[in-house]
Amino acid sequence: MQKKFTERELDRIIEMAWEDRTPFEAITFQFGISEQETIEIMRKHMKASSFRMWRKRVQGRKTKHAKLRDNGTDRFKCSRQRHISGNKIAKR
């Protein structure tokens, strides 16, 4: 079943997926979608060449997968993310 997201939520999912230091688990926590669903959103909403470039960059990247990270790397919030709590996006 495909989840419905607002344009603002889709923009935030894409922004989080694009960030190198934000793991897929953070997207799952905030939006309730799996890594595969995130990839499908990226594929659908990006130009094909941008999607290929993104996939090549994040494939196997330690910072995008919490299980592959070093023990000391557990932060996944960017400076602009401080107003977001769980699955709620506050007005900016």
Image (tube, rainbow, N blue to C red):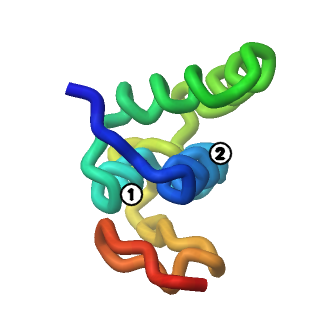
21 to 5, vertically: above or below = below
- Which label is found at residue 18? 2
Q: Position of residue 27 (x, y in %)?
A: 40, 52
Q: Residue 34: which quarter of the image?
A: top left
- Please name whichever residue, 25 or 5, is drawn nearer the observer in this view of the structure: 5
- Note whether 92 is above or below 13 in the view shown: below
**Nearer the observer, 26 or 7:** 7
Q: Quick check: can you spot residue 52?
A: yes
Q: Is residue 10 left or right of residue 86?
A: right
Residue 54: % across, % down: 69, 29
Q: Residue at x 20, y 26 (%)?
A: 1
Is residue 15 shown left or right of residue 27? Answer: right
User: Residue 79 location in percent, x, y?
Assistant: 64, 80
The disc, 1 or 2, on the residue closer to the chain's N-terminal end is 2
Say if mark 1 contacts mark 2, CB within 8 Å.
no
What quarter of the picture does the C terminus occupy? bottom right
Q: Label 2: state its secondary structure.
A: helix
* Location of residue 57 in the rendering, given as x and y in whole percent from the top left corner: 69, 30
Disc marking residue 37: none
Which residue: 55% across, 51% down?
7
- Find the residue positioned furthest to the right: 49
Q: Which residue is rendered at x = 79% and y = 16% of the image?
A: 49
Q: Nearer the viewer, residue 56 or 40?
A: 40
Could you classify mark 1 by the number of other residues whose Cα lies within 10 Å: few (under 14), some (14-19), or many (20 or more)? Answer: many
Mark 2 residue type: Trp
Q: In percent of the image, x 40 and y 47: which residue is there?
A: 5
Mark 2 Cα shell of 10 Å, populated few (<14), some (14-19), many (≥20): some
Q: Which mark is residue 26?
A: 1
Mark 1–mark 2 Cα distance, whole angstroms, equals 13 Å
Query: Which amino acid is tagged 1?
Result: Ala
Q: How many numbered circles does the render carry?
A: 2
Which image quarter: residue 8? bottom right
